[in-house]
Amino acid sequence: MDAARARRHGLRVAPLVSVLLPYRQAEATIEEALESVLAERAVDLEVVAVDDGSTDGGPARVARIAQRDRRVLQVATGGVGIAQALSRAAEAARGALLARMDGDDISVGERLARQAETLLRDPRLDVVGARVEAFAAGPIGEGMLRYVDWLNSILTPEDHAREMFVESPLCHPSVMLRRSALEQVGGFREVPWAEDYDLWLRLDAADARMAKLPELGLRWRHREGRATFADPRYAIARFLEAKAHYLARKLGPARPVAVWGAGKTGRRLARALARNGVAPARFVDIDPRKIGRIAQGAPIVDPSRLERGAETLVVAVGARGARALIRGHLAARGFVEGSDYVCAS
């Protein structure tokens, strides 16, 4: 039963969902992306399709779909970039719930209806993502596959809060969020790093609750030229800057800070934190070759020297599996993640 019929029968339906879909040079994929969203009939929706400076046939294809489906609203920016394009889309949108979609991805499995119902059912939630499947015309790199597996393992609000400074825990085109939550943190912003990660970090700082559907909701296309690979704001160094900027605020001046990890990952994060006014007082490491030495003016000590409550610990290790081992060690000693320590990378 679609949303209009449900309303006529007096059944509960979610508020209007506005799908924000900016696109540029997406002639080959925009129709499939749009149709995958418009196929949903169990939720009231509109699609704000923002042409952000296309010079191909994409806008014409969107126009043809808009002629036969009044749920599609066309906006053109002339080419202002993803953050401003999303701001224009949000301004034009009428819905209390804002969903994301990109012009080269495929929404699957009635994910908008399920996300809207989840937000309607739990007023404490502010953002609901979905599990994703990466696909491409050619092979997908091992690093990306590991990232997708990690991302899909994060489901609950507690999971998202715990992993926020490890990596971006949500795939942007898979999410739905409350307009009120977006407006509370200042909307979409132009920043020196990825605009989506910046949004999750601001929402986390505002104690917003984020979750993810346990089912697949989006087929996430990876192709040459995509911003994830081509835009310098998505480089690893920029992600580190974003983490340090918000993590330094979270740590604050209340207690000294120690970094577990005197290797490349820990030292790199420590330098970034210092640039944001939080210089670690010491490093922690298990490597006997490092213990007793000095790094960035701070001593490197054995984990046995840690004392709960004496400092806030930042776990920053790069070796696969090391973070889980450290979490287990700290839990056995009574350390509580989120108050005694935070994981980052």
Image (spheres, grey):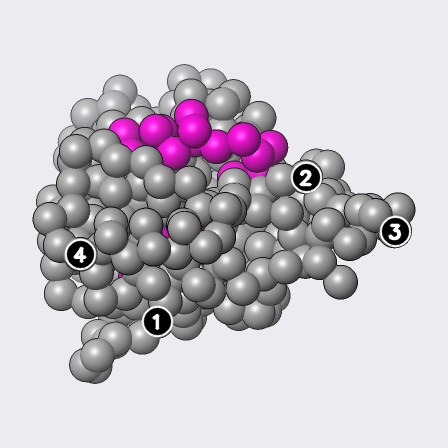
The kind of secondary structure element at disc 1 is: strand
Where is residue 89, by image quadrant? top left
Q: Is residue 308 magenta?
A: no
Q: CA distance from mark 3 to mark 1?
A: 39 Å
The kind of secondary structure element at disc 3 is: loop
Of the two numbered discs 1 and 4 in the rendering, the one whose residue sits closer to the viewer? 4
Is residue 137 or residue 130 the one in the foreground?
137
For label 4, the residue is 57
First in sequence: mark 3 or mark 1? 3
First in sequence: mark 1 or mark 4? 4
- Point out the residue furthest to the right here: 10
Residues marked 3 and 1 touching at CB (< 8 Å): no
Tell me, yes or no, if residue 328 can be seen here. no
Is residue 17 or residue 288 the one in the foreground?
17
The kind of secondary structure element at disc 2 is: loop
First in sequence: mark 2 or mark 1? 2
Q: Position of residue 287 (x, y in %)?
A: 26, 60
> How many marks overall?
4
First in sequence: mark 2 or mark 4? 2
Of the two numbered discs 3 and 1 in the rendering, the one whose residue sits closer to the viewer? 3
Q: Position of residue 231 (x, y in %)?
A: 13, 47
Q: CA distance from mark 3 to mark 2?
A: 16 Å
Which corner quadrant holds the N terminus?
A: bottom right
Where is residue 103, by image quadrant? bottom left
Is residue 154 or residue 313 the one in the foreground?
154
For label 3, the residue is 9
First in sequence: mark 3 or mark 4? 3
Which amino acid lies under the numbered mark 2 shown in the image of this protein?
A: Pro
For label 2, the residue is 15
For label 1, the residue is 134
State whether residue 111 is above or below residue 273.
below
Q: Which span is picked out in magenta? A: 84-104
